Image: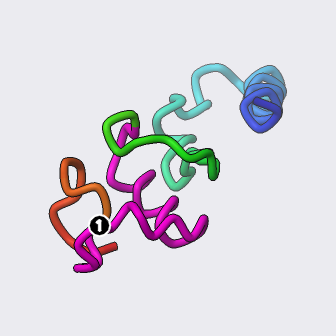
Amino acid sequence: MRLVFLLYLFLATASAQADPLTVPDLRERMEGWHTVQAFDCRDVSCRRLRSCEEACFKLIQCGQSKRDGDHDGIPCENLCRSRC
């Protein structure tokens, strides 16, 4: 949330100082920026996860080996089709 606020503050300051006709639109400014996906290590079932990326995070970063029940490197096979 803090990052979003700082980004807004930066964009608001930049647009206030520049000529409105020469300020690129927000999409051009945001090109190259990536949003931060915050996952945690809470132990929840695969059915409650939202994405394969979250399942991979829990498998690799959190060490939740039960995400890969058949030990083929693919966690939560209801979400993921390939190895992390």
Q: Position of residue 12 (x, y in %)?
A: 77, 22
Is residue 23 shown to the viewer in this render?
Answer: yes
Q: Magenta residues, as a range?
A: 49-74
The number of callouts visible is: 1
Kindly state the secondary structure of the residue where label 1 is placed.
loop
Identity of the residue drawn at 20% across and 57% down = 77
Q: Position of residue 41 (x, y in %)?
A: 63, 52
Identity of the residue drawn at 31% across and 37% down = 47
Is 79 covered by the magenta stretch? no
Residue that mark 1 sits on: 69
The quadrant of the image that shows the N terminus is: top right
- In this picture, is 40 found above or below 48? below
- In this picture, is 38 found above or below 17? below
Q: Position of residue 23 (x, y in %)?
A: 61, 31
Is 68 covered by the magenta stretch? yes
Identity of the residue drawn at 47% across and 66% down = 59
Mark 1, other Cα within 10 Å: few <14 / some 14–19 / many ≥20: few
Asked whether 41 or 1 is in front, the reply is: 41
Asked whether 67 or 53 is in front, the reply is: 67
Q: Quadrant of residue 21?
A: top right
- 41 left or right of 11 in image: left
